Amino acid sequence: MVVNSTPPEDTALPNPDRPHRPPIYAVALVVIGGAIWVVAAAFYSIEVAACPTCADVVVAPGIDTTGYSAAAIRTLAWDALYANLYVATIGLLAIVIGLTGFRRGERWAWFAIAAFVAAGILTAVIDELAWGGWFTFLFLGLPPLVGLVLASRSFLRVPGVDGLLA
């Protein structure tokens, strides 16, 4: 008869080697943020694919496109579709990282999601500068930013140091 000599892990005592898990609502906000990126890219891609020569769909509102040829508008439509592919891919990566490493409390995932949030904020700034797209931040940047802030306490703990960010 083999007896397991390893005592059961006491979960009541803090283990500095084990990562701290973020709250579930923080993970949910990050995943929702990634899903919003995927859905937004899909809907805009469908709109562009439905009418690749419609200047009002492909070009930002307020830009005069009277001098643009149909070929130029089609080229801009292809550019928009490629950009949406990247946006959807980043959203899918955020979902996967959020459901795996971020949920488990791994530090690398916190920094990866921080890069995702920075991309959302940068997109919002560029949109605001281009055509007043402040709403972009509300949809693409705010949910993952709130999730990241809510999870920061569990990710920014320093092992072995009591009271720091506790």
Image: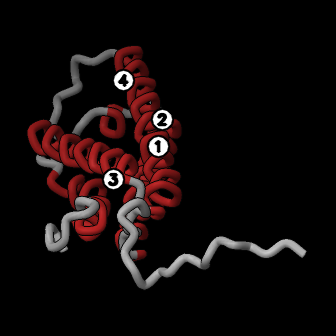
Residue 160 is labelled as: none
Instruction: Give the mark nearer the N terminus: 1 vs 4.
Output: 4
Instruction: Give the mark nearer the N terminus: 1 vs 3.
Output: 1
The residue sitting at 33% across, 53% down in the picture is: 110
What residue does disc 2 label? 85
What residue does disc 1 label? 88
Counting from the top left corner in percent of width and height, residue 64 is at 17, 29
Q: Nearer the viewer, residue 24 or 122?
A: 24
Q: Secondary structure at mark 2?
A: helix
Q: Residue type at mark 4: give it.
A: Leu
* Circles 1 and 4 in contact, beta carbons < 8 Å: no
- In the picture, measured across the screen, residue 86 lies left or right of residue 6, that is left
How far is mark 2 from mark 4, CA to CA? 14 Å
Q: Nearer the viewer, mark 3 or mark 2?
A: 3
Q: Nearer the viewer, mark 1 or mark 3?
A: 3
Q: Secondary structure at mark 3?
A: helix
Counting from the top left corner in percent of width and height, residue 23 is at 37, 75
The residue sitting at 48% across, 45% down in the picture is: 93
Residue 76 is labelled as: 4
* The quadrant where residue 69 appears: top left
Neighbour tally class for label 4: few under 14, some 14-19, many 20 plus, Cα within 10 Å: some
Instruction: Give the mark nearer the N terminus: 3 vs 2.
Output: 2
How far is mark 4 from mark 3, CA to CA? 35 Å
- In the picture, measured across the screen, residue 97 lies left or right of residue 26, that is right
* Circles 1 and 2 in contact, beta carbons < 8 Å: yes
Q: Secondary structure at mark 4?
A: helix
Q: Nearer the viewer, residue 19 or 64?
A: 19
Instruction: Give the mark nearer the N terminus: 4 vs 3.
Output: 4
Q: Residue type at mark 2: give it.
A: Leu
Residue 110 is labelled as: 3
Q: Residue type at mark 3: give it.
A: Trp
